[in-house]
């Protein structure tokens, strides 16, 4: 079981899922290990630009509004029915000091070091999203380390 260095269990699941677990570290078993390694890698390569501020996935545990940016259970009404989030392979990350475009640029510059092949959402309704969506729902025939997609 891989435990991310930079993300706590409550940052990756909604409150109702978090409350189901007595041993909170067991939450990591829900996730694809490559996906957890990828978000740790992204956080690590962005560290020089974050000014000590970190990255945000879910922030409900601190009174924030995000709780569906990591795993989304089958009964969730957020997002697509077959989204990578439902398979515990997708995350939406943001930073209080980095734009999504800056995150794209840093990942692209480090693409050869990514711990797994990934997909990254480039646009949503024609615009750059306010968050970085990254997932490991890659096709077996994906030949590049990063596949960009638009919604």
Image (cartoon, rainbow, N blue to C red):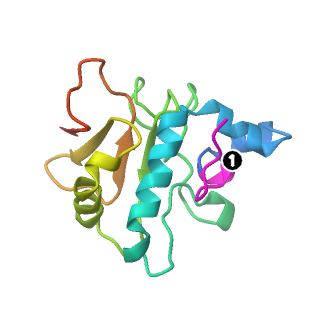
Label 1: which secondary element: helix
Q: Residue at x 28, y 46 (%)?
A: 112
Rendered image quadrant of residue 2? top right
Comparing 114 with 16, the one in front is 114
Q: Residue at x 68, y 47 (%)?
A: 15
User: Is the residue 41 above or below the residue 30 in the image?
Assistant: below
In reply to whether residue 45 is colored magenta, the answer given is: no
Residue at the limit of the structure toward the bottom, as seen here: 51
- Near mark 1 (Cα within 10 A), the count class, few <14, some 14-19 or many ≥20, is some
Comparing 9 with 16, the one in front is 9
Comparing 143 with 121, the one in front is 143
Q: Residue at x 31, y 60 (%)?
A: 130
Quadrant location of the N terminus?
top right
Q: Residue at x 42, y 24 (%)?
A: 81
Magenta portion: prevailing SS class:
loop
Q: Is residue 53 visible?
A: yes
* Residue 122 locus on image (x, y percent): 21, 48
Specify whether 89 is left or right of 122: right
Q: Which residue is mark 1?
A: 15
Specify whether 95 is left or right of 23: left
Specify whether 115 is left or right of 68: left
Rendered image quadrant of residue 96? bottom left
Instruction: Write the start and end of the magenta stretch as one range.
Output: 1-11
Rendered image quadrant of residue 104? bottom left
């Amino acid at each position: 079981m891989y435990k991310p260095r930079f993300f706590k269990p409550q940052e990756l699941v909604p409150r109702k899922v978090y409350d189901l677990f007595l041993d909170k570290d067991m939450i990591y078993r829900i996730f694809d290990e490559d996906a957890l390694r990828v978000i740790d890698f992204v956080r690590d390569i962005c560290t020089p630009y974050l000014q000590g501020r970190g990255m945000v996935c879910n922030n409900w545990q601190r009174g924030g509004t995000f709780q569906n940016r990591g795993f989304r259970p089958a009964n969730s009404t957020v997002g697509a029915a077959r989204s990578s989030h439902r398979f515990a392979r997708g995350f939406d990350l943001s930073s209080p000091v980095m734009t999504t475009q800056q995150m794209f640029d840093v990942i692209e510059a480090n693409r050869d070091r990514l711990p797994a092949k990934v997909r990254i959402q480039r646009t949503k309704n024609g615009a750059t999203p306010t968050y970085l969506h990254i997932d490991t729902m890659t096709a077996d025939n994906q030949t590049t380390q990063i596949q960009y997609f638009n919604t």
